Image: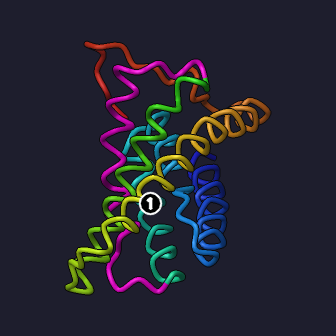
Amino acid sequence: MDLVWVTTWCLIATLAEIVAGNHGVVVPFLAAVGFYFTTIYGWRRTICAVLLFATLVDVALMRSFPAAGFAVLATLPLATFWRIHGDCRWPVWQVGPGAAVGVVYAVVVVLAKSIVTGRWVEGEWLMDALVVGEALAAAAIVLPLCCRVLDWAAAGVELPLYADAQQRPGERDDR
Protein backbone atom coordinates (compact mmCIF):
# COMPACT_ATOMS: atom_id res chain seq x y z
CA MET A 1 0.00 0.00 0.00
CA ASP A 2 2.89 2.36 0.74
CA LEU A 3 4.22 2.04 -2.80
CA VAL A 4 0.83 2.88 -4.29
CA TRP A 5 0.48 5.84 -1.92
CA VAL A 6 3.93 7.25 -2.76
CA THR A 7 3.47 6.68 -6.49
CA THR A 8 0.04 8.31 -6.59
CA TRP A 9 1.14 11.47 -4.82
CA CYS A 10 4.38 11.66 -6.82
CA LEU A 11 2.27 11.49 -10.00
CA ILE A 12 0.00 14.30 -8.78
CA ALA A 13 3.03 16.41 -7.81
CA THR A 14 4.64 15.72 -11.19
CA LEU A 15 1.56 16.85 -13.07
CA ALA A 16 1.32 20.00 -10.93
CA GLU A 17 5.00 20.79 -11.50
CA ILE A 18 4.68 20.27 -15.25
CA VAL A 19 1.64 22.57 -15.40
CA ALA A 20 3.44 25.24 -13.37
CA GLY A 21 6.62 24.84 -15.43
CA ASN A 22 4.72 25.21 -18.69
CA HIS A 23 3.47 28.56 -17.38
CA GLY A 24 7.01 29.66 -16.54
CA VAL A 25 6.73 29.24 -12.78
CA VAL A 26 9.27 27.24 -10.77
CA VAL A 27 7.37 25.41 -8.03
CA PRO A 28 9.14 22.30 -6.70
CA PHE A 29 6.04 20.20 -6.00
CA LEU A 30 7.85 16.91 -6.56
CA ALA A 31 10.76 17.91 -4.33
CA ALA A 32 8.29 18.81 -1.55
CA VAL A 33 6.44 15.51 -1.90
CA GLY A 34 9.78 13.67 -2.02
CA PHE A 35 10.83 15.47 1.16
CA TYR A 36 7.55 14.49 2.81
CA PHE A 37 7.80 10.80 1.94
CA THR A 38 11.54 10.57 2.66
CA THR A 39 10.88 11.95 6.12
CA ILE A 40 8.22 9.31 6.74
CA TYR A 41 9.56 6.22 4.98
CA GLY A 42 13.26 6.94 4.55
CA TRP A 43 15.13 7.40 1.31
CA ARG A 44 15.28 3.73 0.33
CA ARG A 45 11.51 3.42 -0.10
CA THR A 46 11.02 6.69 -1.97
CA ILE A 47 14.07 7.22 -4.18
CA CYS A 48 12.94 5.09 -7.14
CA ALA A 49 9.49 6.67 -7.43
CA VAL A 50 10.81 10.19 -6.96
CA LEU A 51 13.60 9.74 -9.54
CA LEU A 52 11.21 8.20 -12.05
CA PHE A 53 8.81 11.11 -11.79
CA ALA A 54 11.67 13.65 -11.76
CA THR A 55 12.72 12.19 -15.10
CA LEU A 56 9.18 12.72 -16.37
CA VAL A 57 9.32 16.36 -15.23
CA ASP A 58 12.61 16.91 -17.08
CA VAL A 59 11.31 15.24 -20.23
CA ALA A 60 8.00 17.11 -20.18
CA LEU A 61 9.73 20.47 -19.65
CA MET A 62 12.21 19.57 -22.41
CA ARG A 63 15.31 19.98 -20.29
CA SER A 64 18.51 18.66 -21.83
CA PHE A 65 19.97 18.10 -18.36
CA PRO A 66 18.16 16.12 -15.63
CA ALA A 67 17.87 19.09 -13.29
CA ALA A 68 14.79 17.83 -11.43
CA GLY A 69 16.46 14.48 -10.77
CA PHE A 70 19.58 16.05 -9.31
CA ALA A 71 17.53 18.57 -7.34
CA VAL A 72 15.33 15.87 -5.83
CA LEU A 73 18.41 13.81 -4.95
CA ALA A 74 19.86 16.87 -3.22
CA THR A 75 16.74 17.29 -1.08
CA LEU A 76 16.70 13.72 0.26
CA PRO A 77 19.54 14.32 2.76
CA LEU A 78 17.66 17.41 3.96
CA ALA A 79 14.66 15.23 4.74
CA THR A 80 16.79 12.71 6.60
CA PHE A 81 18.37 15.52 8.62
CA TRP A 82 14.98 17.04 9.36
CA ARG A 83 13.57 13.72 10.58
CA ILE A 84 16.33 13.53 13.18
CA HIS A 85 16.80 17.17 14.19
CA GLY A 86 13.63 18.98 13.13
CA ASP A 87 10.11 19.27 14.44
CA CYS A 88 7.65 17.37 12.26
CA ARG A 89 4.59 17.89 14.43
CA TRP A 90 3.63 21.44 13.44
CA PRO A 91 3.03 22.37 9.79
CA VAL A 92 4.14 25.96 10.46
CA TRP A 93 7.65 24.75 11.29
CA GLN A 94 7.90 23.22 7.81
CA VAL A 95 8.41 26.66 6.25
CA GLY A 96 12.16 26.47 6.99
CA PRO A 97 12.78 23.13 5.33
CA GLY A 98 10.43 24.18 2.53
CA ALA A 99 12.58 27.23 1.86
CA ALA A 100 15.70 25.03 1.91
CA VAL A 101 14.10 22.62 -0.57
CA GLY A 102 13.20 25.55 -2.83
CA VAL A 103 16.73 27.00 -2.73
CA VAL A 104 18.36 23.64 -3.44
CA TYR A 105 15.96 22.94 -6.29
CA ALA A 106 16.39 26.36 -7.90
CA VAL A 107 20.16 26.44 -7.55
CA VAL A 108 20.43 23.05 -9.27
CA VAL A 109 18.09 24.21 -12.08
CA VAL A 110 19.99 27.50 -12.56
CA LEU A 111 23.38 25.76 -12.53
CA ALA A 112 22.13 23.13 -14.97
CA LYS A 113 20.87 25.83 -17.31
CA SER A 114 24.18 27.66 -17.16
CA ILE A 115 26.27 24.53 -17.63
CA VAL A 116 24.22 23.12 -20.50
CA THR A 117 24.01 26.38 -22.40
CA GLY A 118 27.65 27.16 -21.67
CA ARG A 119 26.73 30.76 -20.95
CA TRP A 120 27.55 32.63 -17.79
CA VAL A 121 26.16 35.94 -18.91
CA GLU A 122 26.67 38.73 -16.42
CA GLY A 123 23.25 40.22 -17.06
CA GLU A 124 21.43 37.00 -16.18
CA TRP A 125 22.36 36.99 -12.51
CA LEU A 126 19.27 39.02 -11.66
CA MET A 127 17.01 36.60 -13.52
CA ASP A 128 18.70 33.65 -11.82
CA ALA A 129 18.27 35.31 -8.42
CA LEU A 130 14.58 35.83 -9.17
CA VAL A 131 14.20 32.14 -10.07
CA VAL A 132 15.84 31.16 -6.77
CA GLY A 133 13.61 33.57 -4.85
CA GLU A 134 10.52 32.31 -6.64
CA ALA A 135 11.32 28.68 -5.85
CA LEU A 136 12.18 29.57 -2.25
CA ALA A 137 8.86 31.33 -1.70
CA ALA A 138 6.85 28.67 -3.51
CA ALA A 139 8.42 25.75 -1.64
CA ALA A 140 8.08 27.56 1.70
CA ILE A 141 4.34 27.62 1.04
CA VAL A 142 3.99 24.24 -0.70
CA LEU A 143 5.79 22.05 1.87
CA PRO A 144 3.63 23.01 4.90
CA LEU A 145 0.50 22.64 2.76
CA CYS A 146 1.77 19.31 1.46
CA CYS A 147 2.38 18.09 5.02
CA ARG A 148 -1.09 19.16 6.13
CA VAL A 149 -3.00 17.75 3.13
CA LEU A 150 -1.08 14.48 2.88
CA ASP A 151 -1.30 13.87 6.63
CA TRP A 152 -5.05 14.48 6.46
CA ALA A 153 -5.35 12.01 3.58
CA ALA A 154 -3.02 9.46 5.22
CA ALA A 155 -5.01 9.55 8.45
CA GLY A 156 -8.10 8.59 6.48
CA VAL A 157 -6.49 5.41 5.16
CA GLU A 158 -4.46 4.71 8.33
CA LEU A 159 -0.99 5.20 6.86
CA PRO A 160 2.02 6.66 8.71
CA LEU A 161 1.83 10.41 9.30
CA TYR A 162 4.50 13.03 8.78
CA ALA A 163 3.68 14.47 12.20
CA ASP A 164 4.72 11.14 13.77
CA ALA A 165 7.90 10.69 11.72
CA GLN A 166 10.28 12.17 14.27
CA GLN A 167 13.34 10.02 14.82
CA ARG A 168 15.22 10.64 18.02
CA PRO A 169 19.01 10.94 17.99
CA GLY A 170 20.56 7.57 18.79
CA GLU A 171 17.72 5.52 17.29
CA ARG A 172 18.68 3.12 14.55
CA ASP A 173 17.38 4.08 11.14
CA ASP A 174 16.29 0.95 9.27
CA ARG A 175 14.29 2.83 6.67
Res 127 → quadrant: bottom left
Count of marks overlaid on the render: 1
Q: Is residue 85 magenta?
A: yes
> Can residue 91 be seen from the camera position used here?
yes
Q: Is residue 65 left or right of residue 96?
A: left
Q: Position of residue 157 (x, y in %)?
A: 76, 36
Front one among 155 and 115: 115
Residue 140 screen position, x and y as percent: 54, 41
Query: Alpha-carbon neighbours of circle 1 within 10 Å: few (<14), some, or many (≥20)?
Result: few
48 on left or right of 24: left
Q: Which residue is denoted by mark 1 in the rendering? A: 130
**Magenta region, residue range:** 62-90
| Rendered location of residue 95, percent (x, y) | 52, 32
Residue type beneath disc 1 = Leu
Q: Would residue 69 be visible to someone looking at this image?
A: no
Using the image, determine if residue 117 lies above or below residue 174. below
Query: Quadrant of the rendered structure where residue 130 is?
Result: bottom left
163 above or below 42?
above
Dot 1: what SS?
A: helix
When asked about the image quadrant of residue 97, the answer is top left
The residue at 46%/59% (across/down) is 50
| In the image, farthest residue toward the front | 123
User: Residue 6 versus residue 148: which sits nearer the camera?
Assistant: 148
Camera-side residue of 131 and 126: 126
Vertical placement of residue 8 versus 139, above or below: below
Residue at 61 percent of width and 35 percent of height: 144
- Colour scheme used in the picture? rainbow
Instruction: Inspect the magenta stretch and tell me whether residue 63 lies in it.
Output: yes
